[in-house]
Image (cartoon, rainbow, N blue to C red):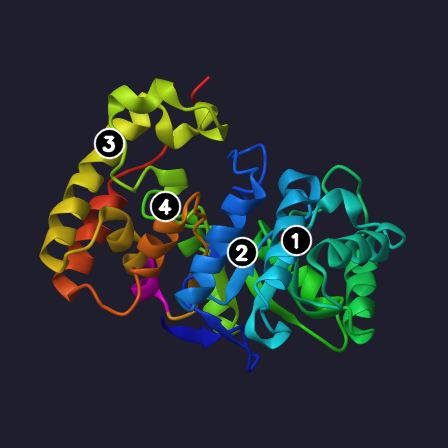
Amino acid sequence: MEYTSLGSTDVRISRIGLGTWQFSDAWGVKDYERAKSIISRALELGVNFIDTAMVYGRGLSEEFIGRALKELGVKRDDVVIATKIPGELLSPSDIPKAVDRSLRRLQVEYVDLLLIHWPPCWHNIPTCTYMRALERLVNLGRVAYLGLSDYPVELAEAARTCLSRTDIEVLQVRFNLVERWAEEEHIPYAEENNMTVMAWSPLAKGALSGKYTLEDLGKFQDLRVNEPVFHPDNYARILDLVKVLREIGGRYEKTPAQVALNWLLQYSDLIVPIPGARSPEQVVENAGSTGWRLSYEDWRRIDEISRGIRVSYAIW
C-alpha cells in the first residue's frame, strides 16, 4: 500500500481509502458480519483511511465501523476515520449534538476528519455561523481536522475565511474518468492550497469496473436504478472506454477498475480515491490499484478517450 499526508498535516493515510456508503439501504450491505469482513480485509491490506457519514444508513455505517474496529482490536492511532455531517444539521445547537452521537456510534473520543457533507442550502444557516461552531469542536478536541464535501470553490473559500485557528484540509468531490468537472476548479484549488482531494464515486458507481453489459442495466436493485451513468445513452459510450481499460489492464495483469483507479492516483499526488466495497474480494481489487504505475503513453491514451465522453444527466 502507498501512503500520503492528509492535507498539510503529518497524518499518514493510505492512497486508497475505504468508502462505506454500502453499509446502508442505498447499497444493501446491512449484515454486520459481512461489513466486518470488508473492514478487516481492508486493514490487512494496509488501508487505514475509512470514510463514512452520519446519513449512511442513518448511522448504521458508523455503528458497523465502530463495532468492527473494537472487535478487531484496532488501536486508535492505526486508523484514520472521516465522517460527514449533513447540511441540515449545521445549526450551532445541532452540530455538537450530531457529532457526539456520531462519536458514540464510532466508539471513539474524537474523529480524525469531519467534513460537511453538503452546504445547508435548505436552511440558510450563515456560513461563518456553522464554520465557527465546527472550529469550536476542533478546539475542544472532539474533531482533529475539517473538510468540505460537495462544495463549490467559491463557498469553500468563503468558509475558510471564517476560521481563525484551523483550516480546511480536505475537499471531497465526485471525480472519475467520465465525470471530470472537478479538474476545472476543485483540483487546481486543492493543489494550490495543499488539500487532499477525496475522490468519491471514483469508479462511477461501478460503471468503470467492466462487470456490466448493456443487458445488465435493468437488473440493478439499488441506487443505480436511476443513476445517469447507467442510462443506456451514457453507458454505451462508457463501454468504449471500459474496453480500452480492459485492453491496457491486460498488459499489467490488472482489472479495468484497477486501471481506472491508478489513473486517478497518477493525476495528482493529492488525490485519494475512496471506492466502496461490498465484499472482501472487492477490497483486494481496489487495493491492487496501488504499487504500480501506468506508462505515460497508456495514461495519455485513457485521458484522451475519457475526455470524449460527456455524461448527460438530463435522462428524464
In this view, the residue in front, 255 or 184, is: 255
Gap between marks 2 and 3 measured at Cα: 26 Å
Q: Residues within 10 Å of mark 4 (few under 14, many from 20)?
A: many
The residue positioned farthest toward the right in the image shown:
93
Q: Is residue 95 above or below residue 194?
A: above
Residue 14, x across and y down, in percent:
44, 69
Identify the residue at horizontal 39%, vertical 65% (top origin). Answer: 45
Q: Quadrant of residue 252?
A: bottom left
Gap between marks 2 and 1 measured at Cα: 10 Å
Q: Which residue is mark 3?
A: 237
Residue type marked 3: Arg
In this view, the residue in front, 217 or 237, is: 217
Gap between marks 3 and 1 measured at Cα: 33 Å
Q: Quadrant of residue 115?
A: bottom right
- Residue 259 is one of the magenta-drawn residues: no
Q: Is residue 300 above or below residue 314?
A: below
Q: Read off the magenta span.
A: 264-268
| First of labels 2, 1 by sequence position | 1
Q: Residues within 10 Å of mark 3 (few under 14, many from 20)?
A: some
Q: Which residue is mark 2?
A: 172
| First of labels 2, 3 by sequence position | 2
Q: Are marks 2 and 1 in contact (CB under 8 Å)?
A: yes
Gap between marks 4 and 3 measured at Cα: 15 Å
| First of labels 4, 1 by sequence position | 1
Q: Which residue is mark 4?
A: 203
| First of labels 4, 3 by sequence position | 4
Q: Which residue is mark 1?
A: 84
Tag of residue 296: none
Gap between marks 4 and 1 measured at Cα: 21 Å
Q: Secondary structure at mark 2?
A: strand
Residue type marked 2: Gln
Residue 166, x across and y down, in percent:
71, 75
